[in-house]
Image (cartoon, rainbow, N blue to C red):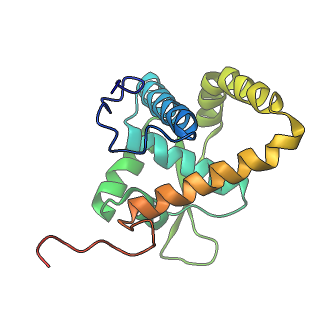
Amino acid sequence: METNEGTGDEHGYWYDNTAATTAILHALRRFRRADQEMRRRMSADMDMNVSDMQALQHVIAAEAQGEPATPRDLSALLGISSASTTKLLDRLSASGHLERHPHPTDRRALVLRSTPHAHSQIRARMQRMHSGMEQAAAAVPPESRAAVVALLDAMASAMAGADAGEGSDGTRPQSPRG
């Protein structure tokens, strides 16, 4: 059996290598690798670690939706303690990427806001990539776009279930210890 796309999957245990869908699954795997590498490069280029970049992206996304981003949100998103979140926010504040402001309805909480500096740095690094992605999406035939969206949404759901430790039937596998 041949090795698949440099994945080391010469045994075929990741998925059935005879399936007609294998090319799609390999393309998704290449896309995910490229996305992970882009995020690593961007973080390094902005002198941040990946968690700092994820936090900044979350704050910007929340702002775009008109939602407040809080330190508690970041703790939950990143799976880190409140002490680690405080250190992360200290770094992002010191680098000029985030500001802390009082929460409008909860005097005990803070709201996080990105700065114009953060937006200009991200825009400068992502503009060309986003343009290329938009061109690639525009090249999908109009009659195929709904199917592509459905596929990507189904993949996101499958990955979310896998991250939660669920099997394909939505149940959690038994621990080897019983």
* Residue 102 percent across, percent down from the top left: 56, 66
Nearest to the observer: residue 33 or residue 120: 33
Side of 81 where 147 appears, left or right = right
Q: Residue at x 48, y 60 (%)?
A: 160
Q: How many marks?
A: 0
Residue 133 picture location, percent across and down: 70, 29
Q: Is residue 137 left or right of residue 81?
A: right
Camera-nearest residue between 84 and 61: 61
> In percent of the image, x 78 and y 25: which residue is there?
135
Image quadrant assignment for residue 173: bottom left
Does 152 sit above or below residue 3? below
Residue at figure coordinates x 59%, y 27% from the top left: 121
Quarter of the rendering occupied by the N terminus: top left
Give the left or right position of residue 10, taking residue 96 as reference: left
In the rendered image, the residue lying farthest to the right is 142
The residue lying at 42 percent from left, 30 percent from top is 40
Camera sees residue 176: yes
Looking at the rendering, which quadrant does residue 132 occupy?
Answer: top right
- Residue 95, compared with residue 87, is above or below; it is above
Where residue 60 sits: x, y (%)? 62, 48
Quadrant of the frame with the C terminus: bottom left
